[in-house]
Amino acid sequence: MAPPPSPDLPLPQRLAKLAQTLQFAWFVGHLTLIVSTSRYALSWLRMNYYSGMAKFSYRLTFIAAALTYGIVVYKTWRARQKTGAKQTGGAIGYLADENIQYLIMALVWLFMPQYPLAMLPYSIYSVFHVATYTRANLIPTIIPPKAISGTGASPSAKPQYSSHPLADAIGSFVKQYYDMSMSIVSSLEILLWIRLLLSALLFQRRSWILIAIYTAFLRARFSQSSHVQNSFAMLEARVDNLVGAQGTPPIARQVWDSVKNGARQFHAVTDANRYINGAAVPKKTQ
C-alpha cells in the first residue's frame, strides 16, 4: 500500500491527499460492501428478501465487489505495462488470476437471481481488507505516529516510530483470525456450489448457467487455495465416515465412489497447467 501523507500537513490536507489515491477508492468499495451486506442481512432476518431496499443492498454489494477487484486488476495490468512484462499462458493465464476470477463472479452475481450465500465470502474478505487499510493508512493519517527517542542511537540512523495501540489491536486481530476466516470462506464457497446444484436439479431460473460458471470458478480456487483443498479434504473424510458406517446401504457407497472418481477425472481434465505450460511429451518406448 502507498505510505500515508506526511504528518507535517494539517489533518484536512492529509485526509484530502489520502482520498485522492486509487487505494482509497478500493477501501471505500470494501467498506460499502460490508455496509450493504449488513443492510441486506437485516432485510433477510425480517424475511423481506425482495423488498426494494433488499434488492438495492444485494446489487450494491456486487457493484462494490466488482469495483474493488476491478481496481486491483487495473493496478496489476498497469504495473505490467510499465515493466513490459507479459502474461504467460495468454487468456488462460489471465483467468488464472484470482482477482480476475472474483471480478468475473461479482459481475455474474450482479446480473443473476439472488443467492444471498454468495455475499458472505466477499464480505469476509472485505472485513480484512478494511482492517488492513485502516491500520496501515487511515490511523497513521489521522493520528501520525510519534518518533521513539532512544539513547545511544546513531545520528545517521533512521528514526523509529511507535504505532498506535488501535493499529496494534487491528494487526493482532488480522493475524489471529485470518487463517480461520479463510477456511470459513472456502467452506462457504463449497456450500454455495451445493446450493447451486440443488437449484439446477430443480431447474430454477438460470441455475444451469450459474452452476457451469461457478464450477469453473471453484475448480480454479481449488488449484490455487490450500484452504479450499483442505475444506474439500474434510468434506471427503466426513462423507467417507458416513458411508463407511455399519448399516449404510452398499448402493450409497457405490454412488459415493462414483462421485469421487468422477471428481478426480474432472480435476485431471481441467488442470489449467496442461494448457499454460503444455502437456508433457510422453517418452518413446524402446
Image (tube, helix red, strand yellow):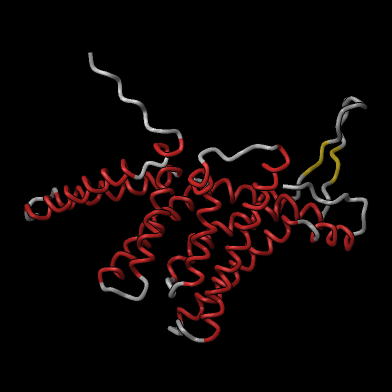
On the image, the x and y values in percent for residue 66 come to 58, 63
The answer to whether 27 is drawn above or below residue 173 in the figure is: below
In the image, 3: left or right of 200?
A: right
Q: In percent of the image, x 52 and y 61: which residue is there?
A: 122
Nearer the observer, 209 or 250? 209
In the image, 172: left or right of 10?
A: left
Question: In this orientation, does residue 3 appear?
Answer: yes
Question: In this orientation, does residue 247 appear?
Answer: no
In the image, 269: left or right of 276?
A: left
Nearer the observer, 20 or 277? 277
- Count of marks placed on residues: 0
- Residue 34 location, quadrant: bottom right
Q: In percent of the image, x 44 and y 71: which residue is there?
A: 116
Residue farthest to the top, as pictured: 286
Q: In percent of the image, x 68 and y 59: which residue is there?
A: 27
On the image, the x and y values in percent for residue 80 come to 67, 42
On the image, the x and y values in percent for residue 21 come to 78, 56
Q: In percent of the image, x 52 and y 81: which residue is there?
A: 54
- Residue 83 location, quadrant: top right
The answer to whether 113 is drawn above or below residue 195 in the figure is: below
Quadrant housing the C terminus: top left
On the image, the x and y values in percent for residue 35 come to 60, 71
